[in-house]
Amino acid sequence: MKKLIALFLLFLTAQAFAVEVAGVKLADSAHFGSRDLQLNGAGVRSRFFFDLYIAALYLPEKSTSAAAVLADGGEKRMALHLLVDIGANRLLSGLSSAIAANHTPAELNALDAPLKEFSAIFHVIDEMKKGDIITLDYLPGSGTQVGLNGVAKGTVGGAPFNSALLKVWLGDKPAQADLKQKLLGGP
């Protein structure tokens, strides 16, 4: 009987954590807002030969199209599983650079207020440690909620900001091209 229970628990664990990336087990789904989101894809964000974090994209339905993901106004989650200790300012600087690379000066000007809100949230967070999980959850009508280890740190309103933020990974000039491919379910 004990073996049967152990096998059942092992089966449940395998179902809850269906994907492992760089030694980190990722849940195959996440409940957010009013629905369950499924893991669309995940990969490692590296810079100068250092692995910084694992990015995992959760969507209501799987998609291989960046344009479709960016155009979809529904609930989404981008989870960043940190592989190193990192200052919030350093991470924010990288995200801001990637946002700038994917937008014209006029588009950036229109995003000025939400970008300042986003920056203020990261200044409150300050330091993040290896193993921490940053969630960037979009809920229509509410905005993008920034969380750290399951604790909400602040929300930035508006669908345009969420789209701009997702372009860090899914835009025409993503922070890392092979990561974009993996987030969209590619090899």
Image: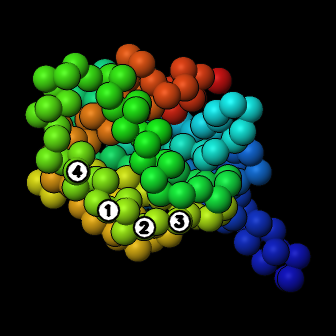
Determine whether label 2 and label 3 are within 8 Å by CB.
yes
Pick the front one: 62 or 154:
154
Q: Residue 116 shows which numbered tag?
A: 4
Residue that carries the numbered disc 3 in the rendered image: 127
Q: Does residue 10 sit above or below 5 in this rendering?
A: above
Helix, strand or loop under label 3:
strand
Crowd tier of the residue under label 3, counting other residues whose Cα lies within 10 Å: few below 14, some 14–19, many 20 or above: some
Mark 2 vs mark 1, CA separation in Å: 7 Å
Give the quadrant of the C terminus.
Answer: top right
Three-letter amino acid code of the residue under disc 4: Lys
* Circle 4 Cα neighbour tier, 10 Å, few/some/many (<14 / 14–19 / ≥20): few
Question: Which secondary structure, mark 1?
Answer: helix
Left or right placement of residue 13 versus residue 170 in this view:
right
Coordinates of residue 139 in the picture (x, y in percent): 23, 54
* Residue 75 as seen in the image, left or right of residue 112: right
Near-viewer residue (41 or 46): 46
Is the Cβ of the residue at disc 2 closer than 8 Å to that at disc 1? yes
x, y percent for residue 24: 70, 54
Q: Is residue 43 above or below residue 71?
A: below
Q: Amino acid at mark 1?
A: Ile
- State which quadrant residue 67 falls in: top left
Q: CA distance from mark 2 to mark 3?
A: 6 Å
Give the amino acid at mark 2: Ile
Q: Which quarter of the rendered picture does the N terminus lie within?
A: bottom right
Q: Farthest residue in the right direction?
A: 3
Percent position of residue 121, x then y: 32, 62
Secondary structure state at the residue bearing disc 4: helix
Would you say residue 127 is visible in this rendering?
A: yes
Q: Which residue is mark 2?
A: 125
